[in-house]
Amino acid sequence: MARTTWKTVARQARIEYEVKKSVFIADVTPVGSGEEATEFIRRIKKEFPDARHHVYAYRAGDEVVEQRYSDDGEPQGTAGMPVLDVIRHQELEDLVCVVTRYFGGILLGTGGLTRAYSTAASQGIEAAGPCKMALLELYHVKLDYSQSERFQYAAKKSGFAVGEVIYEELPIVPVYCAKDDKEKLLQLVNDITAARASVTHIGASATRVEA
């Protein structure tokens, strides 16, 4: 069954974290598939070709969540799995985290490596802004200019997500709602506009609903 809500990150982000002269660079970005994650990993490796390690982990997919990780030469279990564990602990999907390491000449030990990669991943994810997403239905409500602001206020107060108004000969207000709330939205439109607005169903859209 396709998901209706999930948690991911809002944006691409990068942080640097240093431990005993080793520099860990965590790059995190939202992705829609394993293919997108793989392409992002390739770009990071190309950006830092002289780094010792490019450890990564990702979770992506809709009905079936694909997850992969790589230690990239670090001792088994000290790098990729800790990064993946951070992602899973926060119940995140549709993102990839790449932690690039420049070795500083001082060995960290297995415990030190695990802590360093976990910390870098956690900081990277925090910088990328964990958020909640929902699969909502998008409707375009075309109405008179005199009714636009009142309708937007009422829609938000009723719990609907409202997008940026499209201005044509008449304003079009994008409204996102759960499939089961369609009748509630139509009733609100009729109440505010005396049934003089037109409502067009655009389709399903992944929408950020909570920071």
Image: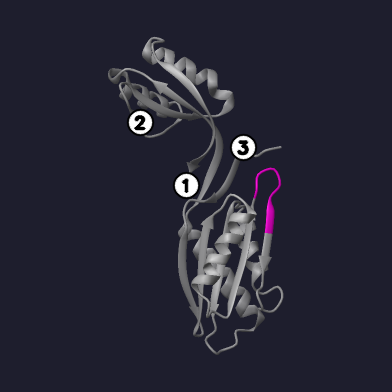
Q: Which image quarter holds the N terminus?
A: top right
Q: Position of residue 208 (x, y in %)?
A: 49, 42
Q: CA distance from mark 2 to mark 3?
A: 25 Å
Reply above or below: 126 against 116: above
Magenta segment main secondary structure: loop
Q: Secondary structure at mark 2?
A: loop
Q: Secondary structure at mark 3?
A: loop
> Can residue 63 be found in the magenta stretch?
yes
Q: Position of residue 54 (x, y in %)?
A: 59, 73
Reply above or below: 89 against 189: below
Residue occupied by mark 2: 165
Q: Secondary structure at mark 1?
A: loop
Residue 80 vs residue 99: left or right?
right
Circle 1 residues within 10 Å: few <14, some 14–19, many ≥20: few
Circle 2 residues within 10 Å: few <14, some 14–19, many ≥20: some
Circle 3 residues within 10 Å: few <14, some 14–19, many ≥20: few
Q: Amino acid at mark 3?
A: Thr
> Which residue is depicted at the point 62% across and 55% down?
35
Judged from this view, the residue extending furthest toward the bottom is 105
Find the magenta span and give its range. 61-67
Residue occupied by mark 3: 4
Q: Earlier in the sequence, mark 2 or mark 3?
A: 3
Residue occupied by mark 1: 211
Residue 93 vs residue 211: left or right?
right
Q: Amino acid at mark 1?
A: Ala
Q: Comparing marks 2 and 3, which lies closer to the viewer?
A: 2
